[in-house]
Image (cartoon, rainbow, N blue to C red):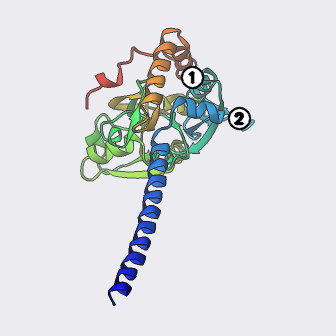
């Protein structure tokens, strides 16, 4: 009996050792996978030969498709410049306002260049480079509309692109009785304003260029809500990539390439931009 018991213990010990080895190997593999996911670097992107950039192609003049179905706009030129300086191909990952952060977190994209304004809330989930561009959040409406404050939107419908800064912001600021209507992108929201489905539009100030081109003299900015700085979004923990992007932004601010892109598409000079660390909450 004693011998049989010793043999059973021996067999049990052997099985336990095998199980521990399997568990140890599995944990090592999982750990390696986790590190690989977190440790995306500039060299990783260069080794792949392409940079995957999430972009909102329904957001003129930042990003849109022209009559030949070719991507155009200030964000498109910014992304092309970055890819060229990295020595890799640009691969656009189409998204919209609400899809920008998920595109990063799901690893469908390495970066977001899509009128992605820095906010403290977003910075809890993703990282931002120093700003490369600038925008104001405003309210547009028909020239004859009597709107000079957010209180004047009570009893009216204000359209926004879902997941954008104006969506989040106006959702908090609009007074009781002011309705907010959400659409998938800016192009759809502009169409809703033009057709009279909504009374006002909450968006970036430079949408005026699109409105004026399509509907000359019909709409105007009624109210400025706030101003925002646009950065390049990336996943948290990629310090190597973040350092590269900050140096890239600084160099292309100094050589004038980023200000030239802004002037070309936004028809106004790019103001002096702060570092991301200088932007208050």
Q: Earlier in the sequence, mark 1 or mark 2?
A: 2
Q: Position of residue 222 (x, y in %)?
A: 37, 32
Query: Would you say 191 lies left or right of 222 here?
Result: right
Please state, as top left, top right, bottom left or bottom right, where the N terminus lies in the image. Answer: bottom left
- Return the mark for residue 279: none
Q: Are marks 1 and 2 in contact (CB under 8 Å)?
A: no
The front one of 117 and 199 is 117
Q: Residue placed at 65% from the left, 28% from the top?
A: 88
Against 50, residue 271 (above or below) is above
Q: Residue placed at 52% from the left, 17% from the top?
A: 258
Against 51, residue 262 (above or below) is above
Against 256, residue 131 (above or below) is below
The front one of 120 and 41 is 41
Q: Is residue 61 visible?
A: no
How many numbered tags mark residues here? 2
Q: Which residue is mark 2?
A: 70
Query: Would you say 210 lies left or right of 280 here?
Result: right
Q: Secondary structure at mark 2?
A: loop
Q: Residue placed at 29% from the left, 22% from the top?
A: 278
Q: Secondary structure at mark 1?
A: helix
**Eye-nearest disc, 1 or 2:** 2
For this orientation, the residue located farthest to the right is: 68
Q: Residue placed at 31% from the left, 41% from the top?
A: 121
Q: Position of residue 176 (x, y in %)?
A: 24, 52
The front one of 44 and 92 is 44
Q: Position of residue 46 (x, y in %)?
A: 61, 30
For this orientation, the residue located farthest to the top is: 255
Circle 2: is it few (<14), some (14-19), or many (20+) Cα within 10 Å?
few
- Return the mark for residue 265: 1
Cα distance between the residues tagged 1 and 2 = 16 Å
């Amino acid at each position: 009996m004693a011998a049989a018991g010793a043999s059973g213990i021996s067999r049990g010990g052997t099985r336990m050792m095998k199980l521990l080895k399997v568990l140890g190997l599995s944990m090592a593999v999982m750990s390696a996978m986790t590190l690989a996911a977190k440790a995306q670097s500039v060299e990783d992107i260069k080794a792949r030969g392409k940079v995957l950039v999430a972009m909102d192609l329904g957001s003129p003049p930042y990003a849109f498709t022209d009559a030949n179905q070719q991507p155009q706009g200030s964000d498109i030129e910014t992304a092309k410049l970055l890819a060229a300086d990295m020595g890799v191909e640009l691969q656009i990952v189409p998204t919209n306002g609400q899809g920008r952060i998920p595109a990063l977190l799901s690893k469908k994209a390495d970066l977001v260049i899509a009128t992605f304004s820095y906010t403290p809330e977003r910075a809890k989930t993703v990282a931002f480079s120093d700003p490369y561009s600038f925008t104001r959040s405003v309210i547009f409406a028909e020239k004859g509309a009597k709107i000079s404050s957010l209180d004047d939107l009570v009893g009216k419908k204000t359209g926004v692109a879902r997941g954008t800064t104006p969506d989040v912001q106006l959702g908090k600021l609009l007074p009781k009785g002011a309705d907010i209507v959400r659409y998938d992108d800016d192009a759809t929201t502009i169409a809703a304003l033009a057709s009279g489905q909504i009374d006002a539009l909450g968006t970036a100030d430079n949408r005026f260029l699109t409105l004026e081109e399509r509907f000359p003299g019909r709409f105007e900015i009624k109210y400025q809500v706030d101003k925002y700085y646009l950065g390049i979004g990336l996943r948290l923990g990629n310090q190597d990539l973040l350092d590269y992007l900050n140096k890239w932004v600084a160099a292309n601010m100094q050589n004038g390439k980023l200000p030239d892109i802004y002037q070309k598409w936004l028809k106004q000079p790019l103001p002096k931009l702060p570092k991301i660390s200088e932007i208050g909450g």
